[in-house]
């Protein structure tokens, strides 16, 4: 299963991630999108599918919700076993080699990552320097159109 767009998110942001995924389905082919709960069939090895899809995607969306920078989630990001960390490290590594792109998608009312860069593990600090796109409830359709254009520019 190949994909163009990988959606990385915390379970606490699953509602927003799902809403973004659903909206992207109107613009892109379902096979071009990867979101774990939507894309991994029962009985498949979760770890290897996530790793393969993160490595082969062309664009990674890093969905950052309001609990993302909470102390317990920062602590999780500092663990090498954290899925979100591993996904984003793959994306940042590909970005540094010019083999892909990452778009931080910041959900209202979350502050931008640049404000908390020092809290992030060193391997993820590059994420804070990337221009983020904010998604709001009130401006969702316009925000999504901006995200779609940003994705298309990276593809």
Image (cartoon, rainbow, N blue to C red):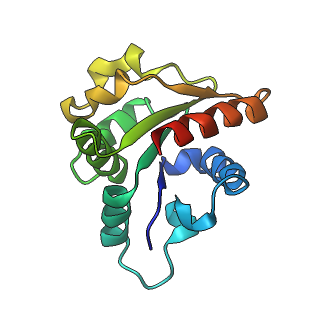
Q: x, y percentage for residue 136?
A: 70, 28
- Count every numbered label the image shows and give the total: 0
Q: x, y percentage for residue 35?
A: 52, 59
* 150, above or below 81, in the image: above
Q: Residue at x 55, y 34 (%)?
A: 150
Q: Residue at x 65, y 46 (%)?
A: 20
Does the rendering let one see residue 45?
A: yes
* 119, above or below 144, in the image: above
**Along the horizontal axis of the image, is 80 left or right of 23?**
left
Q: Residue furthest top?
A: 115
**Along the horizontal axis of the image, is 48 left or right of 19?**
left
Q: Residue at x 38, y 63 (%)?
A: 53
Q: x, y percentage for residue 56?
A: 34, 60
Q: Residue at x 54, y 61 (%)?
A: 32
Q: Quarter-wise, where is residue 97 in the image?
A: top left
**Along the horizontal axis of the image, is 20 left or right of 86?**
right
Rendered-image quadrant of the N terminus: bottom left
Q: x, y percentage for residue 95?
A: 29, 39
Does the rendering let one see residue 34?
A: no
Q: Residue furthest bottom?
A: 43
* 114, above or below 145, in the image: above
Q: Nearer the viewer, residue 71 or 52?
A: 52
Q: Quarter-wise, where is residue 13 in the image?
A: top right
């Amino acid at each position: 299963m190949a994909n163009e767009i990988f959606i990385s998110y915390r379970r606490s942001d699953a509602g927003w991630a799902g809403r973004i995924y659903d909206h992207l389905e109107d613009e892109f082919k379902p096979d071009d999108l990867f979101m774990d709960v939507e894309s991994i069939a029962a009985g498949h090895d979760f770890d290897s599918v996530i790793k393969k899809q993160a490595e082969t995607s062309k664009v990674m969306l890093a969905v950052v919700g309001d609990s993302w920078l909470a102390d317990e989630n920062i602590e999780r990001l500092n663990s090498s076993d954290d899925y979100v960390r591993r996904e984003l490290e793959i994306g940042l590594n590909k970005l540094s080699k010019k083999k892909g792109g990452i778009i931080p998608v910041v959900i209202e009312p979350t502050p931008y990552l640049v404000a908390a860069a020092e809290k992030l593990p060193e391997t993820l600090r590059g994420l804070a320097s990337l221009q983020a796109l904010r998604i709001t409830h009130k401006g969702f359709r316009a925000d999504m159109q901006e995200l779609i254009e940003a994705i298309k520019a990276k593809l």
